[in-house]
Image (tube, rainbow, N blue to C red):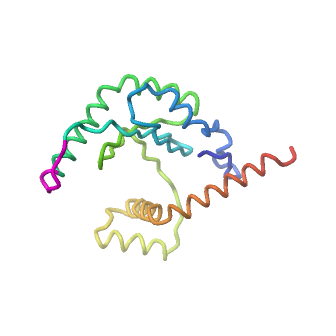
Amino acid sequence: MMTARGRGRGGWQQADLPSADDAQAWFTGRLPDGWFTGAPEITCDRDEIVVVGELPALDTEHPDTDAGRADAAAAESGRISRFREETREARIEIARQAETRYRRKVAWGARLGGTTELFTTISVPVMTRLRQPERLVLDTLVDAGVARSRSDALSWSVRLVGRHADEWLAELRSAMARVDDLRAQGPS
């Protein structure tokens, strides 16, 4: 989850934010019974908390055909849309409370079968400096039609790395949390 790390010299300081280490427990306790089939998946960063829950299964069965799968996807999307509309006021109130507590925006999502939809997530600009070899990678993605712009190519690259490096990133996050724990135990 969240850790207290700074970026140094006049930059943004994550330590200025309240910890979101208890966000999973807080949302699990705060959400109305029956919204989700289990505890929601909570993902936090310094800007946003995303809450995604599994909706109860649909009562219909779909044959294992292309048409059946298309019907299932449409039914799942429709059920997620209904959940979004029916819970809007309550979600706004819960998000308002969480935003006050954690000083981060809250976004919501729902999962049903093979369909996952996120509602009102934020897009945060990120500035970076790249040397020519890295810019050439982005330009190749743009020239090949994989991405519309360098910004889109960078976003695509981050998603690709994230998908293929989940285990390594999880290990890195665990190591960073351990370093933060050790720093907290150090002398004042």
Is 31 or 150 nearer to us in this picture? 31
Is 125 or 36 nearer to us in this picture? 36
User: Residue at (68%, 49%) from the top-left corner?
Assistant: 5
Task: Classify residue 28 as left or right of residue 123.
Answer: right
Most common SS among magenta residues: loop
User: Residue at (28%, 68%) from the top-left corner?
Assistant: 145
Q: Is residue 100 magenta?
A: no
Q: Is residue 62 magenta?
A: yes
Task: Classify residue 48 as left or right of residue 75.
Answer: right
Residue 6 in the image: state x and y as whole percent.
Answer: 68, 49
Which quarter of the picture shows residue 138?
bottom left
Stretch of the chain drawn in magenta: 61-68
User: Residue at (31%, 72%) from the top-left corner?
Assistant: 143
Count of numbered labels shown in the rendering = 0
Q: Residue furthest right?
A: 187
Q: Residue furthest left?
A: 67
Is 6 or 110 nearer to us in this picture? 110
Which quarter of the picture shows residue 13?
top right
Task: Classify residue 143 as left or right of residue 96.
Answer: left
- 66 above or below 88? below
Quarter the C terminus occupies:
top right
Residue 97 in the image: state x and y as whole percent.
Answer: 52, 25
User: Residue at (71%, 53%) from the top-left corner?
Assistant: 178
Residue 70 in the image: state x and y as whole percent.
Answer: 17, 50
Residue 9 in the image: state x and y as whole percent.
Answer: 71, 52
Task: Classify residue 21 as left or right of residue 33.
Answer: right
